[in-house]
Image: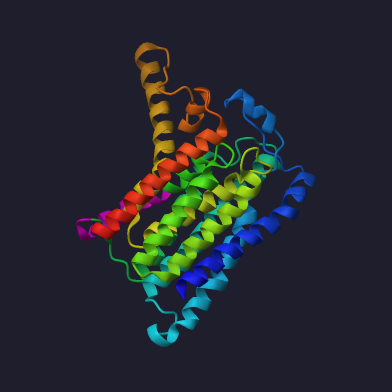
């Protein structure tokens, strides 16, 4: 039953996203909501100037719609065996609270995109404004988990259940903010964030099924379907960009899946590309500032950061970057699945 509904959710999210693109892209063109390509990026990206952004709205509609229909249908059909809604309060809050959290991150991204493309301020929200809003959303999500019964325990493969006490909340806050920002950094070339997140969601779906968290298997299937639908328009050469509207929403969904399964640590192997993108940026900035301070001349570790731009500068085309990074995601996801099975 759960497999059929998960498949239906994925197909529905895919179809709705594709249909939404039929009207959203011309509409964004008409409103002149085009992406401004900054001079600090690769020079050949300039040809993308004016490509519609804020396209994340397309898959947000598809994903949220599929989840809000498919998950209640599943719980209603299985309520005779497992009680109304099927799972305990904490699991329901993890699922629906995670969805609300992702939507709030998407709203922050929408606001940021709106300032960039409508108000013509390339940098959008200030760093403090953006981080402050994201911190607020993260804290509210964690507060909802606490009120639902979460008490600082987490699952670690090969170790089992670990109670981190108060430290859990500090680590969780760092993981949420780090993951969402990392997914945002991954959205730098055509099809990259969509492809990596589609594959990551598929692995979360598999793990949810193995753990018998069928509500989250449907949740993850919808995310995968929505990303696949978006790639119809976003794969190179992209006809639309997801913008911060989409990338921050997807970051929230990745967080929701990791915490929803009780295995936030699995975000690391499944989302290894996200981690690699963020670390390359941190290393680049840190090394530049350090060498400028010591020698008076800033030096760089990478030709350009985040790391997908480094490979572009090395001569890789965008499609090759997406394929290689997707293969890395498959390897990381396979390791995560095996760790759950064996650990």
Front in this rendered view, residue 33 or 104: 33
Main SS type for the magenta part? Answer: helix
| Rendered image quadrant of residue 238 | top right
Asked if residue 155 can be seen in this view, the reply is no
Front in this rendered view, residue 138 or 31: 31
Asked if residue 95 can be seen in this view, the reply is yes
Q: In percent of the image, x 47 and y 22: which residue is there?
A: 303
Total marks drawn?
A: 0
Q: In percent of the image, x 60 and y 58: which residue is there?
A: 60
What x and y, as percent, mark residue 96? 48, 68
Q: Would you place residue 320 above or below residue 133 in this image?
A: above
Left or right: where 296 falls relative to 317: left
Magenta-colored stretch includes residue 291: no
Q: In percent of the image, x 48 and y 27: which residue is there?
A: 311
Q: Would you place residue 12 above or below residue 301 in this image?
A: below
Q: Residue furthest bottom?
A: 80
What x and y, as percent, mark residue 45? 63, 29
What x and y, as percent, mark residue 207? 37, 61
Q: Quadrant of the C terminus?
A: bottom left
In this picture the colour scheme is rainbow
Q: In this picture, which residue range is highlighted in magenta?
A: 158-177
Magenta-colored stretch includes residue 159: yes
Front in this rendered view, residue 338 or 46: 338
Left or right: where 114 falls relative to 320: right
Q: Would you place residue 315 above or below residue 217 in this image?
A: above
Q: In percent of the image, x 61 and y 42: which residue is there?
A: 235
Left or right: where 2 falls relative to 126: left
Q: Residue furthest left?
A: 159
What x and y, as percent, mark residue 255? 42, 55
């Amino acid at each position: 039953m759960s497999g059929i509904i998960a498949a239906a959710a994925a197909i529905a999210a895919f179809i709705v996203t594709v249909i939404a693109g039929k009207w959203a892209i011309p509409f964004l063109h008409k409103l002149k909501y085009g992406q401004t390509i900054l001079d600090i990026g690769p020079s050949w990206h300039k040809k993308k100037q004016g490509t519609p952004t804020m396209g994340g709205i397309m898959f947000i509609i598809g994903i949220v719609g599929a989840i809000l229909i498919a998950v209640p249908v599943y719980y209603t059909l299985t309520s005779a065996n497992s009680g109304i809604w099927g799972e305990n309060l904490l699991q329901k809050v993890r699922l629906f609270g995670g969805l609300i959290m992702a939507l709030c991150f998407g709203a922050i991204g929408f606001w940021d995109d709106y300032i960039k493309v409508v108000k013509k301020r390339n940098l959008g929200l200030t760093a403090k404004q953006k981080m402050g809003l994201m911190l607020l959303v993260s804290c509210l999500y964690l507060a909802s988990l606490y009120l639902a019964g979460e008490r600082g325990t987490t699952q670690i493969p090969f170790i089992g259940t670990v109670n981190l006490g108060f430290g859990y909340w500090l680590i969780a806050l760092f993981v949420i903010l780090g993951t969402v920002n990392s997914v945002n950094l991954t959205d730098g070339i055509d099809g990259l964030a969509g492809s990596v997140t589609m594959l990551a969601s598929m692995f979360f779906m598999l793990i949810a099924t193995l753990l018998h968290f069928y509500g989250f298997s449907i949740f993850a299937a919808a995310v995968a379907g929505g990303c696949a639908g978006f790639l119809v328009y976003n794969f190179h050469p992209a006809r639309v960009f997801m913008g911060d509207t989409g990338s921050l929403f997807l970051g929230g969904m990745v967080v929701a899946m990791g915490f929803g399964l009780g295995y936030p640590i699995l975000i690391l192997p499944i989302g290894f590309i996200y981690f690699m993108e963020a670390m390359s940026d941190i290393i680049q900035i840190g090394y530049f500032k350090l060498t400028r301070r010591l020698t008076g001349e800033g030096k760089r570790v990478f030709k350009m950061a985040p790391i997908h731009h480094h490979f572009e500068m090395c001569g890789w085309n965008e499609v090759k970057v997406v394929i290689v990074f997707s293969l890395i995601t498959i390897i990381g996801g396979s390791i995560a699945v095996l760790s759950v099975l064996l650990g």
